[in-house]
Image (spheres, rainbow, N blue to C red):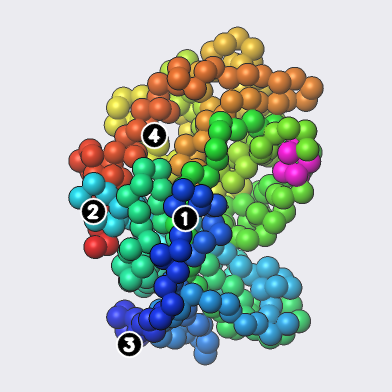
Amino acid sequence: MSGMNFQFPVTHNPNSQLDGIDWNNLPFGKIFTDHMFVMEYADGAWQQGQIVPFGPISMHPATSAIHYGQSIFEGMKAYRNLQNEVVLFRPELNAQRFSESAARMCMPTIAEDLFLEAVHQLVALDAAWVTNKPGYSLYIRPFMFATDEFVGIKPSDTYKFVIINSPVGAYYAEPVRVKIEEFYTRAAVGGVGRAKAAGNYGASLYPAKLAQQQGFHQLVWTDAKTHTFIEESGTMNIMFVINDTLITPSEDSDTILRGTTKRTVLELAASWGVPIEERAVTVTEIIEALKSGTLQDAFGAGTAATIAHISTIGFRNELFELPAIESRTLSLRIKTELDNIKSGATSDTHQWVRKIC
Ligand code: COI
C-alpha cells in the first residue's frame, strides 16, 4: 500500500441521471448516483483506486466470489443538514468493521483512512444527490469480493473493492411484525455471524420468506444451539425496554453483528442516565415481560431503518401486541435526537458527525 495516492483520479460521468429522479417515489436501493469507486487488489497489494461513471462490472464466469462467497459489505449513510452541509455519521465504525469482516473471510483488509477517504471523495463528487428532504439520505454501500478466475477452492489472490451510492427514503413503511425463530439459524458460534458477510444475508432469506408467508415482516433470530437466547431481528440488532431498562443481547458471542446504530443508541441512552443491560437475553424473559405487561418497547436498530419499531411478536402459536408506538418514550426520544444530531438541529456533543462538504 506504500505510495498509495489518496487523491483518487476521477473519470466524470457525462450523462448524469440526477434530473430524472422522482424524489416522491424513491424505492430503497434501486437508484444509484452517477459515480462509483473501484479499487483492485493484486500482487499482494491494493492498487490505485479511482472514481468512474456508475455502470456494470464485467466478470469471468469462474469469478471465485460467485462460487464460494468471499464477499463482504458495509452500509452507511450521508445526510444533508440544515446548514446545507453533507455529513457522515460515525463512518470510522464502518471502516473498522469492514476490516474485521475482511479478516474473518480471509480477505485483505483496507486501511481505515483509505476506506474513509474513498467514501469521502465519492460522496463529495455526487453531493448533489444528497437531499435535505426529511427522512431521506444517501445510502452508501462499500463492498469487496474475490475475483480470482478459478473454480478450485482457496482464498482468492485478487479482489475488487467498490463503493456505490443510492439515494433513499424510509426502509420500512410501518412498524414491523416479527416472529421468534426456533428452528432456522442466522449464525452459529465459531461461524461468520459477526462479519457483514454476503452469505449471512443470503442464508436468511428462506426462513424470512416462510415467516413472511405467515404475515410477519422479519424473524427474531435465536442462538443456533438452544434457540433460547435472542440474538438479532432480521438484518438489525434488537433492543428492548423492560421496566424502564434498555436491554440488548451482548456482543460477547461472535454470532452478533456489531451495529453502529445499536452502539449509538446505547451511548445516547447512557448519557441520559437510562439503565442499560448488555447481556444474554432469553426468549422466556421476553415472553414473560410481554405477558406481564412490563415490556414497554422493542425495536430493531440498523443503518437502513435506523429505529424500526416492533408492533407484534409471534412466538409458537401466540401473537403478542406491543404497546402503542406513541407510548414508546425512550425510542421516540432516541429517534428524534439522532435525526436532530444528523440534521444539525442539535449540537453534536458526542462528535459523531463528519462533514464532507
Ligand atoms: C441494515 O439494517 O442497515 C442493513 O444491514 C440492511 C441492509 C441489508 C439493506
Q: Nearer the viewer, mark 2 or mark 3?
A: 2
Residue 208 located within the stretch drawn in magenta: yes
Say which mark, if any, is on residue 84: 2
**Is there a contact, CB below 8 Å, between mark 2 and mark 3?**
no
Counting residues from the N terminus, which is met first, the one under dot 2 or under dot 1? 1
Counting residues from the N terminus, which is met first, the one under dot 3 or under dot 1? 3
- Looking at the picture, tell me which residue is in the foreground, 99 or 295: 295
Instruction: Count residues near mark 4 (Cα–Cα under 10 Å), then give few for <14, some for 14-19, many for 20+.
Output: some
Residue hosting label 1: 22
Residue 347 quadrant: top left
Q: Magenta segment, which residues? A: 207-212
Question: What is the secondary structure assignment of the residue under circle 2?
Answer: loop
Could you tell me residue 80's position as x and y percent? 30, 52
Q: Nearer the viewer, mark 2 or mark 1?
A: 1
Whole-number angstrom distance, CA of label 2 to CA of label 3: 35 Å
Residue hosting label 3: 3
Whole-number angstrom distance, CA of label 2 to CA of label 4: 21 Å
